[in-house]
Amino acid sequence: MTMKTMLFPTAPAADDPDKRYWWISVALWPITGVITGTPPLVAKLTAPQRKKRAEAADLRTRQEELAAKAAKAAEDAFQEKLQGESDAAKRAAMIEARQAAQVAARQVQQEQAKASSKAFRSKLGDQAGAAALMLVVGGPLIWSLARPWIPIAAELVAAAWWLAALIHAPTPADMAATMAAAARRQQRSAAEQSEESEDDQEELDDDQADEDDSAPAPQPLTLAELATTIEHMVAIRATKDGGAGNLLLSEALATLQHLGHYPGADSREFGAAVRAAGMPPADKSIGVVIQGERKVSTGWSAAHLQDLLGRTPVLPPLRAVDHTPAQAA
């Protein structure tokens, strides 16, 4: 594209029946050219800064991902070490030490942030003071010397900006092509979203139909089945937390609701059900570590069930498998 075609509108075709609109566009081009050319010019001038900001944002995202992975690995290692410790007192001491280390790390981060903010404010204050001193001392002299040149400089800047905007102004053909491409992208995006919605709805309908056909509705638990289930849950938990067998009432309710039992029930309604089954929770709250966070609430423990049942909670029976060799016919 030559300088002439960028600075002025494209000449009309020789067989154009009406050329007056072209003359109107030529007359208005000093204004319309600046209006349409300013956004591309601004985008071109700010492209390096936007690229630097995007690279900095990508770097921060990568650093956050690596920090999250490191934190997760450390948490998994701590949980594995905690599960391998059989002494309840040592496990509590390990948890307290971990929490104290986390608090200390947060305090160090806060102190570093305060020091950085203080240094930034001090540097900003020094720069502001130097600028104020320069304005007070050299301001009148600079103004007296530069005052005659300010209008000329402003006119030159405005003329340079006007010329650059005209150079970067898109032609009517370019604008039409851009609008057509945007319309095609919008239509393609709408079509893809419609197809995805239809596919998701079909998958949901298929899954629902499969569940309706193959998965019968779970039968409600009897009081004896509920008591046995709570005992098995506590016994299974005891194999994982060093024999404590701490189980929260909310955990048991969530597990049973996942299996289709007690739909819509809350902790109070489920608590009434387990009390009716002869499995009341312990009088004292118990603590359970869930995903690295210690939660204390109502529940059961192996010691509580042993006092309640008069025996140690038993694990659920395993299905018997016949391993004897088959006899030859």
Image (cartoon, rainbow, N blue to C red):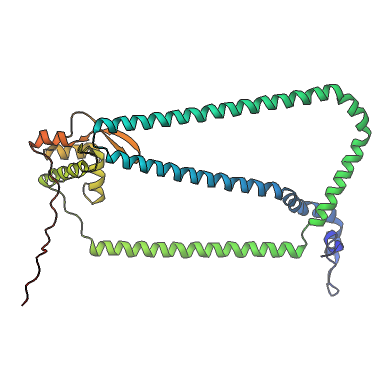
232 left or right of 192?
Answer: left
Q: Position of residue 281 (x, y in %)?
A: 18, 34
Q: Position of residue 62 (x, y in %)?
A: 53, 47
> Which residue lies at the image location 7% right of the left edge and 36% below the top edge?
310
Q: Quadrant of the N terminus?
A: bottom right
Q: Quadrant of the C terminus?
A: bottom left
Which picture quadrant has residue 199? bottom left
Which picture quadrant has residue 72? top left
| Residue found farthest to the bottom | 329
Q: Nearer the viewer, residue 112 or 178?
A: 112
> Which residue lies at the image location 51% right of the left edge and 31% below the top edge?
109
Q: Position of residue 8 (x, y in %)?
A: 85, 60
3 left or right of 203?
Answer: right
Q: Position of residue 122 (x, y in %)?
A: 67, 24
| Picture layout, residue 100 above or below residue 190 | above
| Picture layout, residue 62 above or below residue 19 | above
166 left or right of 46?
Answer: right
| Picture layout, residue 303 above or below residue 10 | above
| Picture layout, residue 193 above or below residue 257 | below
